[in-house]
Image (spheres, rainbow, N blue to C red):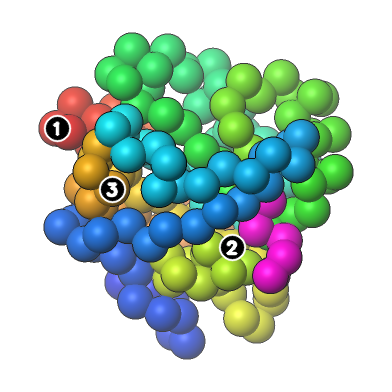
Amino acid sequence: MTHAPAVGLAAVPGAGDAAPDFTLPDTHGTPVHLGDLRGEAVLLVFYPFAFSRVCTGELSELRDNVEDFEGAGVRLLAVSTDPVFTLKAWQQQEGFGFDLLSDFWPHGEAARAYGVFDETTGHALRGTFLLDADGVVRWSILSPRGKARDLQAYREAVARL
């Protein structure tokens, strides 16, 4: 299911669209280039803020069920506009075993490319994109502010991949 972007946002890539490419640092400062991940499916999860209640709940649920994605050959990448050091502290505190990527500078560039950057507040919205091994969007969803995404919807999208 794909939802239309909020007012003032760029178009959200939908099923069949090529996924916008990016290079973002992980919690160690190591660049992760999406284009280098061709050959494996990717679940790209944009979220607003590290350490916030809803985001912590969402990513903890993914952490606790990461084998669902890894077993299906899907790599999980979580992206926010938080700085690398904030994401590193949060990853250590919560034990996230998947990559947290920082879209801090240029601020929100990747989120903008996916149509999930809120220009008014300066953070990413809750947008999720499932990319196939060729880098094509196969499923996406944009969740309302403050509303956690449904893990079962992720599982169903991965099963259809």
Q: Amino acid at mark 1?
A: Arg
Residue under numbered circle 3: 135
In the image, is residue 156 part of the stretch drawn in magenta? no
Q: Nearer the viewer, residue 140 or 104?
A: 104
Q: Which residue: 78% across, 46% down?
A: 84
Residue 160 is labelled as 1
The percent coordinates of residue 154 (x first, y second) are: 33, 35
Q: Earlier in the sequence, mark 3 or mark 2?
A: 2
Q: Amino acid at mark 2?
A: Ala
Is residue 127 placed above or below 38 in the rendered structure?
below
Q: Say which element carries label 1.
A: helix
Query: Closer to us: mark 1 or mark 3?
Result: 3
Is residue 90 placed above or below 143 in the rendered structure?
above
Is residue 147 placed above or below 117 in the rendered structure?
above
Q: In the image, 50: left or right of 78?
A: right
Q: In the image, 83: left or right of 100?
A: right
The crowd level at tag 1 (other Cα within 10 Å; few <14, some 14-19, many 20+) is few
> Start and end of the magenta stretch?
102-107
In the image, is residue 103 part of the stretch drawn in magenta? yes
Q: Quote the CA–CA distance across marks 1 and 3.
A: 16 Å
The percent coordinates of residue 85 (x first, y second) are: 85, 43
Q: Quote the CA–CA distance across marks 3 and 2.
A: 21 Å
Residue under numbered circle 2: 124
Q: Are marks 1 and 3 in contact (CB under 8 Å)?
A: no
Q: Nearer the viewer, residue 150 or 133?
A: 133
Query: Closer to us: mark 3 or mark 2?
Result: 3
Q: Say which element carries label 3.
A: loop
Q: Which residue: 42% across, 58% down?
A: 21
Which image quadrant is residue 161 in? top left
